[in-house]
Amino acid sequence: MILDWLLPVLISVALLLAVAGMLKRISLWRAGQPEKVSFFSGLMAMPRRYLVDLHHVVERDKYMSKTHVATAGGFVLSMVLILAVHLFGVENRWLSYALLSALVLMFVGALFVFKRRLNPPSRLSKGPWMRLPKSLLMFAVSFFIATLPAAGILPENFGGWLLAAVLAAGIVWGMGELLFGMGWGGPMKHAFAGSLHLAFHRRPERFGGGRSTGLKPVDLTAAKLGVEKPTDFKWNQLLGFDACVQCGKCEAMCPAFAAGQPLNPKKLIQDMVVGLAGGSDAKFAGSPYPGIEVGKAEGGPNKTITEGLVSPDTLWSCTTCRACVEECPMMIEHVDAIVDMRRFLTLEKGNTPNKGAEVLDNLIATDNPNGFNPGSRMNWAADQNLRVMKDVKEADVLFWVSDGAFDMRSQRILRSFVKVLKAANVDFAVLGDEERDSGDVARRLGDDATFQSLAKRNIAAMSQYKFKRIVTTDPHAFHCLKNEYADLYPEGQKPDYEVLHHTTFINELVKAGALSLEEFKGGTVTYHDPCYLGRYNGEYDSPRELLNELGIEIAEMERSGFRSRCCGGGGGAPITDIPGERRIADMRMAEIKETGAELVAVGCQQCTAMLEGVVEPRAEVKDIAELVADALIEGDAPVSKKNGKQAKPNADKRVAEEIL
Amino acid sequence: MSDEIIRRDPRAEWIARNRLHPLHDAMQQAGAAETRGPSGLIRRNPHAVGFIGPNGIKRIDRMNGNGPAVGGRRSAGAAKEVELPLHKVENPDYYVVVVPDMVGGRLSGHDRDVIGQAHKLIREGEGAGAVLAVVFGEHREEAFDKAGVDRLLNITGEAFEGYTPELRVAALEQVEKEYAPKYWLLPDSVAAGFELGCRLAARIGERPATQAWQVSSEEAICRGAGGTTDITRKTPRLMLLAEECAEPIDETRHEVLPVELEASVSVQAVIQDCGQVAVDPNAIPLGEAEFILSAGNGVTDWNQFHQAAEALGATEGASRVAVDDGNMPRFRQVGATGTWVTARVYVAVGISGAVQHLQGIGQCDKVIAINTDVGCDMVKRAALSCIADSGEVMAELIRLANAYRQEVVENAA
Amino acid sequence: MQPDKQNANLRIAALVSVGKHPGSGRARRAEQDARAVEMGLAMAPQGLEVLHAGDPHAEALRAYAGMGLKKIRILQQGENADAVPALSQYLGESKPDIVLTGVRAESGESSGMMAYLLGEKLGMPVVTRIAEIVSIDNGQANLLQALPRGQRRALRVPLPFVASVDMAAAAPRQSAFGPASRAEMEAKKADVEVRDEVQASWSEAPARKRPKRLKVVKAKTAADRFKAATAKSSGDGGKVLRDKPASEMAQAVFDLLLEEGVIR
Ligand SMILES: Cc1cc2nc3c(=O)[nH]c(=O)nc-3n(C[C@H](O)[C@H](O)[C@H](O)COP(=O)(O)OP(=O)(O)OC[C@H]3O[C@@H](n4cnc5c(N)ncnc54)[C@H](O)[C@@H]3O)c2cc1C
Ligand code: SF4
Ligand code: SF4
């Protein structure tokens, strides 16, 4: 029969073409900048990363995860068996049966893909992606029928040349999509690029349950700072872009997109793909950047991205909340890419929009974003009697005050926290005027030079003193100190302290019985997870436990925990202030309202400012430190929570020491 | 003495201010500050500005005529203006030359301080010095005597009208030749003094002390480094003086003897003054505007708001909410993420006074709040607050402004 | 910025100094000087030379370079040398069409004399506080001079001239780290170096706080003094009007506006 010789030919041709396409694709990635990866261990780790880590993310959507397991598993299995049965002609009935069952599995999976595609949510891209389930079905069905004779279920020559022709057509379609398309940029590209992306991921720490959220430092002596053209990305970043399946999970989570600002993380990644391959975005079949028409953008590997491909406003809309990264099943790093491009705009072009330039100038000239006299950093604490490191040289805890020192509202949080520290007799001190802005805003605005300068000076200040832990009420400073400063220590030195957020620290104090708290007597309370505490540092529990300790039952919002929605205050977004249709903070406040909460507890002064910027009437906003400070029973010796016994005199001091 | 005690009558003062009050005319007839001229128009008597205290000492109006021109009603037996002693310099041993700014044709407060400084230097030195004021163009000052001007050199002529720095410096150079003043004193001001002083210094090769704020005949203390340092130096011949460098003269009168230059001044000026450009208050960059009417979420009638701004001649500002809601353009936003304004007077209509907004008006001198909520932060920040609906107050303001303009036009006619 | 304004043959020298942040006292690019550079870049990006007399290693100078300058020319001289002789000597030779300076420096004496001394030495007219160079035609420049409160005066001056640039001029573009760190600092020993003798005899200290003058009412009797002491000066903080007819409140507002002299 014709298929007997046609099939191997078709398969071989498809495979060859696919390989050719893949090589071409690889050459596109290799146009990127070199970056060291551990090649073999990456490849070795890939299956595990796929089956465990990636699956873990996909698993959040049970429907899709099962569908994907069936379809992809079925396909991979089928492909292997097809090679055996149809290309190498292994004549083994059991093998053919196995192939048939694999194809059935794939068919069933494809049916579910098909079903999802009947009425797809807006986050999914259409276009070729609408064709994919049909191609999958076609592939499965055609090969199924073509395999029946080999399995001895149908006689050889069944159906004659007509069926053979139909099957051949079906197989060409199926393989065209699934093999040819894999190398030449069809939807199936994701399988090929995705698996390599997992192998050569820039942040391998993310696999195996780890976390890697700190931005990578810029080499300030480089000939070009930041990313101007697609080829300025590291090669594995380019590879990562190609892994995108256009599932739009990122789009659905992106606060800037929801607020109608001109950013859609999915489109951004697709534009990067357009850039790395060259061409226009005319074929993009998903939601546009709000307010920007699709089809006008053009780019190429060596064309400046912000001239024609992506508008700078798109890049500046991002709050760096990492919701997209958290949600992306392909573990693509949107924030890295966005900040890389911002770095070029700021460090090379001097084009930080709006108040950006002013804030950066202030950070350079005064070490704080508002240009206050750096000598007035301690004014807020004039009545607090704080110990300053310069005097005491040593303390158990370094209280990192942050720029909240200059802001009246934040000062209330700081005072509350000091009250708590004092009540628990914690041995703490502050850096005073030696403290500088952590560099968070500068870094997110792309000014890594200023970030590094601030960080190095902060490190130098801290290195003079002895302390075991740093505690701060500012999750942004927390993140920088914990995850980003290590890169900037002088050669051969490492941070030798632990960095804690105040909610974690207070929670410890409470658990250790160093504080006695009365029940919270207010209405319904909800909790807003700050991005830089939650997604950046995985601290979702301490604030909740602490609120529970206060006797508060949290009325959780739908978007909470790792899916919490940003308040709009991160990444310098309030400074660049790109207009949208709504304010992110307003949307968040609406979500708070839905829970019926009269009070929203937060753990960040920036969130406080953003949420309080929403016009009244709205829920009251309080930092957890404030809630705890209000609930402190002062004077009494603390009551240990567990046994309810009166603690011994002076126990509070000891307990506090014990936990340090 | 009892019948000379003046009791302020707030109601009467208010009626005197309110030209629309039915009793206003009657009240004005009684007062002396304004009289009706033969044509029936109101004529103001500038000498009646301010009021005389119980002891017959005139309360000097430190606002230099910027204050409302009303005083307490004088009781019938009020003392007449007391004559201040006349300070005479018959044959001056030397001159201290002052070049006042003469903003609007009158001595400014800064000018008076500088003249005060001139007298202080004369008092400290030997011999009899006279203060010679050089005034360019037509002026409207009537109280050079009380400001301390012993000699007045008024250089007039069409050539000196407008912006003519080259010609003026040439004239001052001539003064230098003819009078060889012991000191040259000018106000270090944006208005004119700074420029003229620098030009003169460069021309006659004197190194000036600038932003001098404490000057004796020995030593001058000057602000340097953009106002962040104090430089103490020997007192030079030419000084650009800061505001409030010395107390103005207020207890003597002076001769104001006119003097003239012997030689005539002429120069080939190359800087051509093409006139002041008409700037619509609303086109003034927000950061430079001196009077801002700013709208927030408490404004409902936007047409009315624009009308009010126009009628008052104010530059428009807005809170972020007003901008977000599309009622005002983005470049009008005042605050942390908008413009930081420096207006002297800032009227916040229906703005609650969020920190981010207050940050933007930190440098404003007088804040006026119009708000329904007496507890809001803007009211706490404001010098004057009206707890009322913004629409009603703005309607009244428009009416008042229009009435005021009408009157000015009539007066000018 | 506006290409139609740019003039290919125009040669501009922008003089820059090391500024000083009022809050921290740290060296920075001076705000007015940066506006001068901005004006130069907008008018003649090709023909702009940025010039400094002083220490070529001053880091703050790089902040000007970060505006996109390939190089900054530095007439190297000692700390207490007078900048005018060196600059006028150099400018006398290079003969630019326009010399731009700030109105007043942020560090040192801040006398504001620079423009005038140069004008005098070079025999060029000096224009004070310009906000914009509108256009250049027939060897004459049309300028806008900044007056207080956002007002402007149109001036016309023949080239070459010296102008000091006001804060009202277009804000300077952002200084970018990359170009700043790569720009060439072309230092050359100044041909003339004159020690500033006068300055050597000064003493300098951080600015003392100046008490604000009180509104003194010269009172001859105790009753007067009492009255002066208790009198509330008009508009003094936090007067709240409520439960009054709107017309009355508006009148109070209007009176205050009149008193402040903002109604014209
Ligand atoms: C990062 C960040 C940056 C921000 N930057 C800025 C900024 O630059 N500028 C800015 O303005 N805001 C800024 N905001 C927003 C700010 O927090 C406030 O939300 C905003 O200023 C409130 O505007 P508003 O006062 O007009 O509105 P509201 O807070 O709603 O106040 C309206 C006021 O009008 C009064 N009112 C209501 N009806 C009437 C009536 N009929 N007559 C008279 N009064 C009435 C009410 O009593 C109330 O006081 C920022 C917020 C954040 C988080
Ligand atoms: S970037 Fe990730 S989350 Fe976004 S569409 Fe692509 S695969 Fe989905
Ligand atoms: S980090 Fe947040 S704001 Fe930025 S693209 Fe991702 S989801 Fe959107």
Image (cartoon, coloured by chain):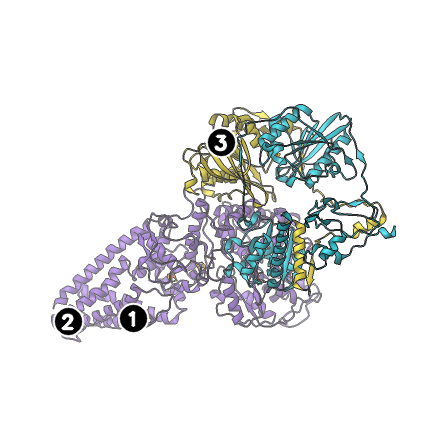
Q: Which residue is mark 2?
A: A163
Q: Are marks 3 and 1 on the same chain?
A: no
Does residue A443 appear to the left or right of A127 in the view shown?
Answer: right
Q: Are marks 3 and 1 in contact (CB under 8 Å)?
A: no
Determine whether the residue tagged by mark 2 lies in a helix, strand or loop.
helix
Kind of residue sitting beneath label 2: Leu
Gap in Å between the C-alphas at discs 3 and 1? 80 Å
**Which color has been applied to chain C in this rendered view?**
yellow
Determine whether the residue tagged by mark 3 lies in a helix, strand or loop.
strand
**Against B114, is B176 above or below?**
above
Chain of the residue under label 3: C
Which quarter of the figure has residue A547?
A: bottom right
Sequence-first disc among 1 and 2: 1
Q: Residues within 10 Å of mark 3 (few under 14, many from 20)?
A: some
Q: Position of residue C192 (x, y in %)?
A: 54, 24
**Which color has been applied to chain A in this rendered view?**
purple
Q: Are marks 1 and 2 on the same chain?
A: yes
Please say whether residue C145 is visible from this viewpoint. Answer: yes
Kind of residue sitting beneath label 3: Pro
Q: Which residue is mark 3?
A: C158
Total count of labels: 3
Quadrant of ligand 1 in image: bottom right
Q: Are marks 3 and 2 on the same chain?
A: no
Q: Which chain is cyan?
A: B
Q: Position of residue C72 (x, y in %)?
A: 48, 34
